[in-house]
Amino acid sequence: MKLREHPFVKKHWPPRWKPFFEATAPIAGEVGVLDEVRPSRLYDRCCFFLMDYRGKKYIGRLCFDDNNFCRKFIDFVKRQRGKPIARIAELEVPTALAQATLVRWYR
């Protein structure tokens, strides 16, 4: 299963991209190159993406229903720094991410 098709990801994907300290318009879609992904300091079920698109920086946020899944998602995605967002969305979901889903579904 591709990352963008994962049941916990697909309803939130792709993030909504907003300008990061620049006066440009928001953009949409699987665009740009991943600079960084960070956990939210306020909500343990959310993370922030920083990406570069045509020389400008954008930020996007994803929030999930499960904080364990969010941590595993961040661990997986942060290893993809420097890659296009569209290519990251195409990656096959690793076992750890799939297991996080199973834990949630069987609680």
Image (cartoon, rainbow, N blue to C red):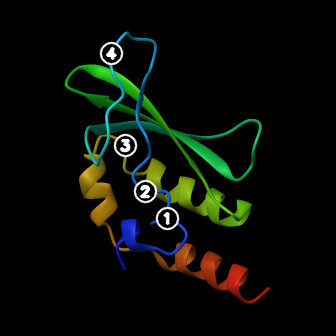
The image shows a total of numbered marks equal to: 4
Q: Nearer the viewer, mark 1 or mark 3?
A: 1
Q: Amino acid at mark 3?
A: Arg
- The residue pinned by badge 4 equals 24
| Residue 93 appears in the rendering | no
* 10 Å crowding of disc 2: few (<14), some (14-19), many (20+): some
**Residue 82, above or below 24:** below
- The residue pinned by badge 1 equals 9
Expressed as whole percent of the image width and height from the top left, the position of residue 44 reads 74, 49
Question: Is disc 2 placed on a helix, strand or loop?
Answer: loop
Expressed as whole percent of the image width and height from the top left, the position of residue 1 reads 37, 80
- The residue pinned by badge 3 equals 81
Question: Is disc 3 placed on a helix, strand or loop?
Answer: loop
Q: Amino acid at mark 2?
A: Trp
Q: CA distance from mark 4 to mark 3?
A: 23 Å
Looking at the image, do the residues carrying marks 1 and 4 touch, with CB atoms under 8 Å apart? no
* 10 Å crowding of disc 1: few (<14), some (14-19), many (20+): some
Q: Amino acid at mark 1?
A: Val
Classify residue 27 by image quadrant: top left
Instruction: Mark 1 or mark 3: name the one nearer the start of the chain.
Output: 1
Looking at the image, do the residues carrying marks 2 and 1 touch, with CB atoms under 8 Å apart? yes
Left or right: residue 42 compared with residue 55: right
Instruction: Mark 4 or mark 3: name the one nearer the start of the chain.
Output: 4
